[in-house]
Amino acid sequence: MHAILVIGMPGAGKEEFVRVASETGYKVVRMGDTVRAYAQRAGLKTDDASIGKFASVERERHGKDVWAKRTLEGVEGKCVIDGVRSMAEVEAYSKALGDKAILLALVAGSGIRFGRLRARGRSDAPKTYEEFKSRDERELGWGLGDAIGHADYYLTNEGGLRAFRRSAKALIENIETE
């Protein structure tokens, strides 16, 4: 059984990869759900800026791997973990899961990602390119770029949805045969 740790910049296709993994029998564990649950318990707003600030403050207070450690409670069996942001988190999962932890980076250019985020229409979608870049910088500040650089697998997502889903499924099948 594998735990696929999914990383990527906002809009790179993490949600769609998770959907494909779920369709192929993987349990879905979202680090963002853990962050939002803790933020809700603290009585915070659920907008992107408030959640992002809360996540950062908790990392400063409890260590860069705090969200991985808190999320590990929901990790078991064949699963895909969405929302990994740093090498400290990767290392926490690797320590707990051993060689079952597989790091997958999803990659797409910034213009494509910005368009996708805007098209989603979610409440946390950036309204301007400056907001988009600010979000990227925040996540890179958490160490996301370093984690992407250490991935076991890379999957580029700059084409159509159908092609990406086929590539994602093929990659999952490849991981399972190793």
Image (cartoon, rainbow, N blue to C red):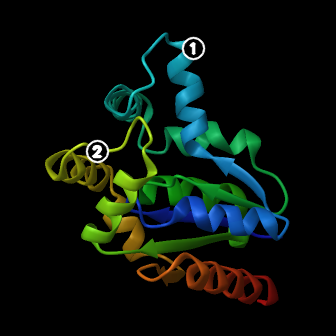
| Residue 169, percent from left and from top | 71, 81
Judge from the rendering whether residue 11 lies leftward or rightward of residue 101; answer left or right. left
Crowd class of label 1 (few under 14; some 14 to 19; many from 20; radius 10 Å): few
The answer for how far apart the CA atoms under marks 2 and 1 are is 25 Å
Would you place residue 33 above or below residue 143 in this image? above
In the structure shown, which secondary structural element does the residue marked by tag 1 occupy?
A: helix
The dot on residue 126 is 2
| Residue 34, percent from left and from top | 60, 34
| Residue 3 visible in the displayed image | no
| Residue 137, percent from left and from top | 22, 52
Residue at (57%, 58%) from the top-left corner?
Answer: 15
Q: Nearer the viewer, residue 50 or 65?
A: 50
Would you place residue 160 above or below residue 5 in this image? below
Crowd class of label 2 (few under 14; some 14 to 19; many from 20; radius 10 Å): some
| Residue 98 visible in the displayed image | yes
Residue at (41%, 60%) from the top-left corner?
Answer: 11
Residue at numbered disc 1: 41
In the structure shown, which secondary structural element does the residue marked by tag 2 occupy?
A: loop
Q: Nearer the viewer, residue 56 or 26?
A: 26
Would you place residue 60 above or below residue 130 in this image? above
Q: Identify which amino acid the numbered label 2 is placed on.
A: Pro
**Mark 2 or 1, nearer chain start:** 1
Q: Quadrant of residue 131?
A: top left
Image mark count? 2
Q: Identify which amino acid the numbered label 1 is placed on.
A: Arg
Q: Residue furthest left?
A: 130
Residue at (72%, 89%) from the top-left corner?
Answer: 174
